[in-house]
Amino acid sequence: MQNKNALPILFFVMFLVMIGFGIIIPVLPFYAEQIGASPTELGLLMAVYSFMQLIFAPIWGRVSDRIGRKPVMMIGIAGLGISFLIQGLSTQLWMLFAARIIGGILSSANMPTAMAYVADITTEENRGKGMGIIGAATGLGFVFGPAVGGIFSKISLGLPFLLASASSFITLILVFLLLKESSEKKSVEKRPSLLEAFNGPTSILFVMQLLISLSLSGLEATFAYFAAKKAGIDTVELGYVFMIMGFASAIIQGGLVGRLTKKYGERMVIQGGIIVSAIGFGLILLVNSFLTAAVYLTIFGIGNGVIRPSVSALLTKTSTAGHGSSTGLLSSFDSLGRIIGPPMGGWLFSITIGLPYISGAVLSVLALILFQIYRPVAKMVKEN
């Protein structure tokens, strides 16, 4: 369809993007706390980023349908670089909030545009493999990013943000030089509406993604505190925990998602991923050491990691709207979960430290039930 090098280049680009994003994950809670943020304010700090993505991801997706994927992706990567730079130089809490708002607005272009790019250059048969490669890039970013962030946080809690900014601007240059445009803009006769993207059987995929995102973001907002209290894990060890989880997730997504979806169909893979992630939530309650934290979070990460690529592949096959509009709206629902999840997770954590993970397991079961009873989704796609 497009040149054979497009997918490996896109993989490398998203890998670098996620390295930058992953660098700050084990550091942000402690960095915000150092500046003066309470656990509730930390939750709001994470939520405001997602609120901007909720609003702007569908817009960027529609723009990419009109003007092409490459310029929109460059806007998103530049936004990340600017946001990380401001965060690294922040001395007051309002500066962190400003940086997160700017980053949320601009970086919301990245994931929906990358998924739309994959949909542009792959056949329906290989769509799951392509989306899995994007997931693998994300996973590998988490292999190296959090470990780097944890190590350099020992020098300064602000240094990982500056490294993330540098990584983003290097990636921006590579995109400009190497990545070719994928969409045929002339074939887009009209701007697809969001109502057209949120249409019929595909609507179940958006609602399910909301529940999955809600449970995941509650874990992300509280796991640093949970691991410290239950097992005495510091930022360096936490970075390695996320590294192990990311490596396992990358192997599964890059090597198995394509094969599994081709053999069993996206629907079966999604269901299996939800079940495994629910089990992972339950196991996290039993964390009492670095080893158990790494193993149990990895089990959760493997299950959760195969869901998004499979949902994205299924969505681009069934939606009647443009690829950018559909994946942008999916990212918007993902962001909605990330708005509600962190403050909810912080609130549940304040009641009892295991409650965010109990609620995560419950939400996973609800997502599974919802997906099971909505049969029309499965009927719209050839599973074999």
Image (tube, rainbow, N blue to C red):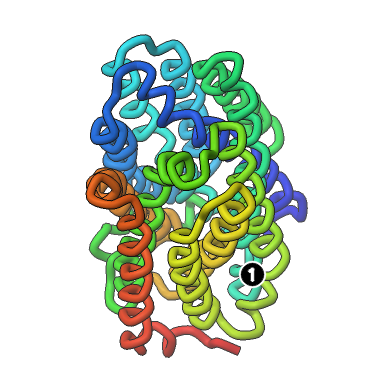
Q: Nearer the viewer, residue 153 or 4?
A: 153
- Who's the residue at 62% across and 58% down the image? 295
Locate residue 66, reporting x and y percent.
41, 47
Please determine whether, in this image, residue 134 is positioned above or below residue 276: above
Quadrant housing residue 329: bottom left
Q: Quadrant of residue 121?
A: bottom right
Q: Is residue 312 above or below residue 35?
A: below
Residue 70 coordinates in the image, percent (x, y): 55, 40
Where in the figure is residue 136, as x and y percent of width and height?
Answer: 65, 54
Residue 292 sits in which quadrant?
A: bottom right
Q: Which one is in front, 49 or 281?
A: 281
Q: Amino acid at mark 1?
A: Val
Along the horizontal axis of the image, is 66 left or right of 171? left
Which residue is denoted by mark 1 in the rendering?
A: 257
User: Residue visible at 33% across and 37% down?
Assistant: 46
Quadrant assignment for the N terminus: bottom right
How many labels sit on residues?
1
Q: Does residue 360 appear left or right of residue 195 in this picture? A: right
Q: Position of residue 64 (x, y in %)?
A: 44, 46
